[in-house]
Image (cartoon, helix red, strand yellow):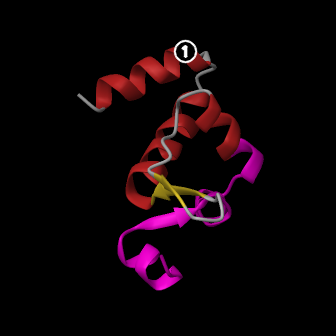
Amino acid sequence: MTRRMRLANGLLKIGEIAREAGVLVSTIRYYTDMGLLRVVANTPGGYRLYDREDTLERMYTIKTINGRKWTLSEIREELEKRNQ
């Protein structure tokens, strides 16, 4: 999949989504590993691809909730509620 095709489909690599969300790549990896963010596909080279709209919305929610000092499990529960 070319970059143009990825962008047209709203898919971003991990570095691109980190840049847009204003966080480090390691933060995106951590939240993905904790089940807070979803990888929608992988490139043939093994890069994680994220849905731009969904991931940025989730990152906004995580950042907002983080200010309230919630645990990761509480954040995960809140994200699940919002997706129902």
Q: Position of residue 37 (x, y in %)?
A: 51, 39
Residue at the outermost left position: 84
**Which residue is at 54% across, 29% downward?**
35
The image quarter in which residue 52 lies: bottom left
Q: Position of residue 50 (x, y in %)?
A: 49, 55
Q: Residue 25 vs residue 48: left or right?
A: right
**Which residue is at 50% across, 46% downward?**
39
Q: Nearer the viewer, residue 7 or 63?
A: 7
Image height of 51 relative to 38, above or below: below
The image quarter in which residue 29 lies: top right
Q: Position of residue 56 (x, y in %)?
A: 48, 53
Prevailing secondary structure of the magenta residues: helix
Quadrant location of the C terminus in the rendered image? top left
Q: Residue 38 vs residue 69: left or right?
A: left
Which region is colored magenta?
Answer: 1-27
Residue at the outermost bottom position: 4
Q: Residue 16 vs residue 39: left or right?
A: right
**Which residue is at 35% across, 71% downward?**
9
Element assignment for label 1: helix
Q: Position of residue 40 (x, y in %)?
A: 44, 50
Image height of 77 relative to 29, above or below: above
Amino acid type for the residue under numbered disc 1: Ser
Image height of 39 relative to 71, above or below: below
**Which residue is at 68% across, 63% downward?**
15
Residue holding disc 1: 73
Q: Is residue 33 magenta?
A: no
